[in-house]
């Protein structure tokens, strides 16, 4: 089993190739301080996690390493380091032999008081709710809920889940994931963690209701159109919880069985679909149907698949670094090299058929 960390793998690979930090910086256009930060795992040097991920992928590709493996290893390390070490929680704060006589008497007095209070509590216990009622309340609170709406304050990052592939999502209290399932825009987020289980929410746009389910580390959940609350879902989704921390969860999402009789692409109601090909690193911002999607640095060689129902807004820092295919049209360069490009695509009524809609660009 490989126990090496991300920084160690990068440094050893560079040294095996007899390369200096200066050599790598010159070849990759990554500043030397960021190369050192990656090798020493000092991620505080990066203005945002998106930059760290982008540079890590570029550096790994340059060294001919498995960038997907390193990105997953990085995410796993971040989750592990966010958990409080068990030894810190169980370490005694004071040796029992360091107690003097006065402290010993004080502790005995507190213990006697606590025992007395507990006895008084038991004498009034019958007047409170029965244990059966408490158990019933606990079960009710932990059951699935489908009537709540998406909590405010969550930013959704747009992801793609290709066929025959499993994609890891990192969910935090302020960051969820938006992805497409047979041209349905779906959202997944975490509402909280209790008893080692993540309380996960799943929404199908444009519905407002959220389907909640609980999942512990290693558990598998199938989100299916056979579930009454998810009857509009066009295919099954497999969710495996890989890790759960105090405030986050890592899940692996896979598209499964398609709903019988449902077309992959709705006739006459085609969504806005844009694919971006990055030849160089570029800063991006995406807003999908009014929800903030991805925002940050995208590395060279990456491909982004975006899908919206009614409105897609894009902002790209270097138009010459990106090529675009929009709803099957010819592949074109997004803009001029080094120039900021903004594009907004909207759904509008077909002027020749009021029952149909078409995709147009704002300002055309």
Image (cartoon, helix red, strand yellow):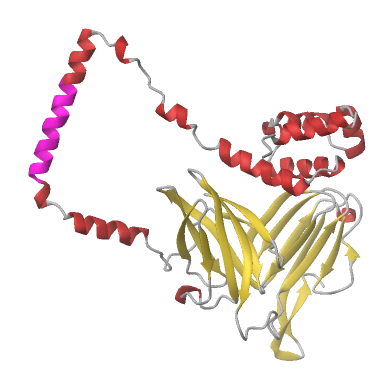
**Which residue appears at 90% of the width and 29% of the height?**
19
Quadrant where the image shows the C terminus: bottom right
Residue drawn where x is 50% and y is 56% of the image: 219
Residue 142 picture quarter: bottom left
In percent of width and height, residue 125 lies at 12, 47
Q: Does 110 sit above or below residue 263?
A: above
Q: Tell which of 212 and 152 is nearer to you.
A: 212
Q: Quadrant of residue 18?
A: top right
The N terminus is located in which quarter? top right
Residue 168 visible at all: yes
Determine whether, in the image, residue 11 is placed left or right of residue 145: right
**In the image, is 13 to the left or to the right of 23?**
left
320 and 118: which is toward the camera? 118
Residue situated in front as seen by the camera: 229 or 290: 229
In the image, residue 120 lies in the stretch drawn in magenta = yes
Image-quadrant location for residue 160 = bottom right
Q: 150 above or below 226?
A: above
For the point 92% across and 34% down, which residue is it?
26
Up/down of 74 relative to 90, above or below: below
| In-image side of 8 versus 254 (left or right) | right
Residue 311 at x, y percent in the picture? 69, 69
Q: Residue at x 21, y 59 (%)?
A: 133
Q: In this orientation, does residue 290 appear?
A: no
Q: Position of residue 202 (x, y in %)?
A: 52, 64
Is 244 in the magenta? no
In this picture, is 125 found above or below 108?
below
| Residues rendered magenta in the picture | 109-124
Magenta stretch: dominant secondary structure: helix
Image coordinates of residue 230 in percent, x first then y, are: 50, 74
């Amino acid at each position: 089993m490989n126990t090496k960390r991300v920084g160690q793998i990068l440094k050893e690979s560079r040294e095996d190739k007899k390369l200096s930090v200066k050599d790598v910086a010159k070849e990759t256009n990554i500043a030397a301080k960021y190369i050192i930060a990656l090798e020493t795992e000092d991620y505080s040097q990066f203005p945002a996690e998106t930059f760290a991920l982008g540079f890590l992928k570029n550096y790994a590709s340059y060294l001919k390493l498995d960038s997907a493996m390193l990105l997953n290893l990085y995410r796993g390390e971040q989750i592990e380091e966010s958990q409080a070490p068990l030894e810190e929680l169980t370490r005694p704060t004071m040796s029992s032999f360091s107690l003097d006589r006065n402290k010993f008497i004080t502790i005995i007095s507190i213990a006697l008081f606590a025992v007395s209070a507990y006895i008084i509590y038991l004498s009034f216990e019958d007047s409170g709710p029965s244990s059966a009622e408490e158990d019933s309340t606990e079960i009710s609170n932990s059951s699935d809920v489908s009537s709540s709406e998406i909590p405010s304050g969550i930013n959704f990052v747009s992801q793609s889940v290709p066929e025959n592939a499993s994609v890891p999502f990192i969910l935090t209290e302020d960051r969820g994931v938006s992805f497409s399932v047979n041209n349905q825009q779906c959202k997944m987020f975490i509402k909280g963690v209790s008893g080692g289980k993540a309380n996960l929410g799943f929404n199908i746009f444009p519905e407002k209701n959220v389907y909640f389910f609980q999942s512990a580390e290693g558990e598998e959940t199938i989100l299916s159109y056979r579930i009454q609350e998810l009857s509009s879902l066009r295919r099954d989704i497999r969710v495996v919880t890989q890790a759960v921390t105090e405030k986050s969860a890592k899940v692996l999402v896979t598209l499964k069985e398609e709903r019988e009789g449902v077309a992959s692409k709705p006739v006459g109601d085609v969504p806005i679909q844009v694919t971006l090909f990055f030849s160089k690193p570029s800063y991006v911002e995406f807003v999908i149907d009014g929800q903030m999607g991805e925002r940050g640095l995208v590395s060279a060689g990456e491909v982004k698949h975006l899908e919206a129902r009614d409105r897609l807004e894009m902002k790209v820092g270097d138009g010459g670094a990106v090529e675009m295919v929009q709803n099957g049209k010819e592949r074109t360069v997004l803009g001029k090299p080094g120039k900021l490009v903004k594009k907004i695509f909207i759904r509008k009524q077909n002027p020749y058929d009021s029952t149909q809609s078409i995709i147009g660009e704002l300002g055309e």
